[in-house]
Amino acid sequence: MPRTLAGRSHPGLLRFLLLAVTCLAALAFVAESQASAAALTPGDVVIYRVGTGGSLGSSAVPVFFDEYDSSGTLVESIALPTTTSSPNHRLTASGSGSSEGLLTLSANGQYLIGTGYDAALGTSKVAETANPGVARTLARVSASGEVNTTTALTDVSNENNARGATSNDGNEFWWSGAGKKTSGGVHYATLGATTSTLMSTTEENARAVAIFNGQLYASADPTKEGNTISTVGSGLPTTATTTTNLPFATAPNEPYAFTMVTLGLGSAPDTMYVADNGAGAIVKYGLLSGKWVKQGSVAVTAVTGVTADERLLRRRRRALQDHRLERRRRHADRFCHADRHRALRRGLPWRRLHAWHDVRLGRWHPATTGADDHA
């Protein structure tokens, strides 16, 4: 499991909600009128940061996407707009909104997706502002560092937190948050839209949303919604649908962000990491006999974000498997040498004994070298 930062910190890194920047290539062109920063580097980590240091309250503060390399060195900070510059809207955040800033990577690996408020810096109790009135802004940042905040929704997170969003291709989005009446939950919208479509009337207080293997998932507070992490419809729904809770052997207490990877031989996700705020840990689950089973955890206080680089995990897993196989081979070789010595003493064919040891390794390769070696 890769080490990730999550939760809250002190000035400068006030909300760690992480994303591995992977597979970023062949990106779509973004208009020159939009803000631009340096290109992001595949394999780095990006953090949704709130504020510039000092004390924070419930007022609107600036948001930055901070990129770090694998050694933990800051590469760059991408500032999101704090003033309107058509077609881009402002994107600020609440200084005290602990459930906000759930950053994601688009399913095609080309865009970072974040959310906030179309509100001026210093707006009092920004998470409680009415919408319509103060729209909720969605940010799309490309691998080349270009910022697009043209999507400002007027029907989501009314008087409540803008939490997160995800996308399949940077043009379609699924929003998550809380809000009065039907403004909370998971909503679907397109790039540049001002209104959205509510996905489910039975789950109106969503936390994180993410797409894995072509399926939309969402997390929620189980004490309010009854769901922990669920599928939202089938595939990537764009109209009203239903949610179905994932089958957990032991469900997360308070899930926020989550990530799924495929480490086995199949094509569907078989491993999941969950930022479980209630447990104060990042929890690993494995899919066994149709159920998600807890397989370990790492303590992280007040955790809300988590990420994983599937390619790195696969490389480390293969390296571990190769190491174990080499140890088994060496162990078997010792038996082979002992058996050969006994065979020579007894006048038996060495091939037969040698093949037995290949079976111990799970392979059957009748020996050719030494096949006619007799005492």
Image (cartoon, grey):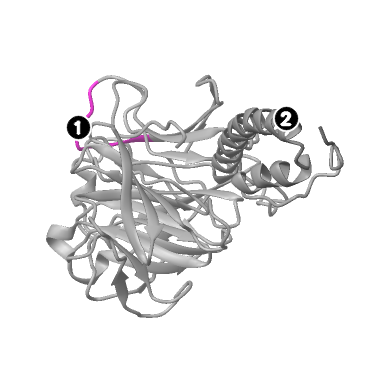
Q: Which residue type does callout 1 highlight? A: Gly
Choose between 67 and 183: the one closer to the eye.
Answer: 67
Q: Nearer the viewer, residue 48 or 133?
A: 48
Q: Position of residue 262 (x, y in %)?
A: 52, 54
Q: Main secondary structure of the magenta part?
A: loop
Q: Nearer the viewer, mark 2 or mark 1?
A: 2
- Looking at the image, residue 222 sits to the left or right of residue 162; the answer is left
Q: Residue at x 45, y 46 (%)?
A: 84
Residue 28 position in % (x across, y down): 68, 54
Q: Which residues are magenta?
A: 55-62
Q: CA distance from mark 2 to mark 1?
A: 84 Å
Q: Residue furthest front?
A: 346
The residue at which mark 2 appears reads as 345
Could you say which disc has been placed on residue 57 in the image? 1
Query: Crowding near pointer 1: few (<14 within 10 Å), some, many (20+)?
Result: few
At x 20% / y 56%, what residue is drawn?
A: 221
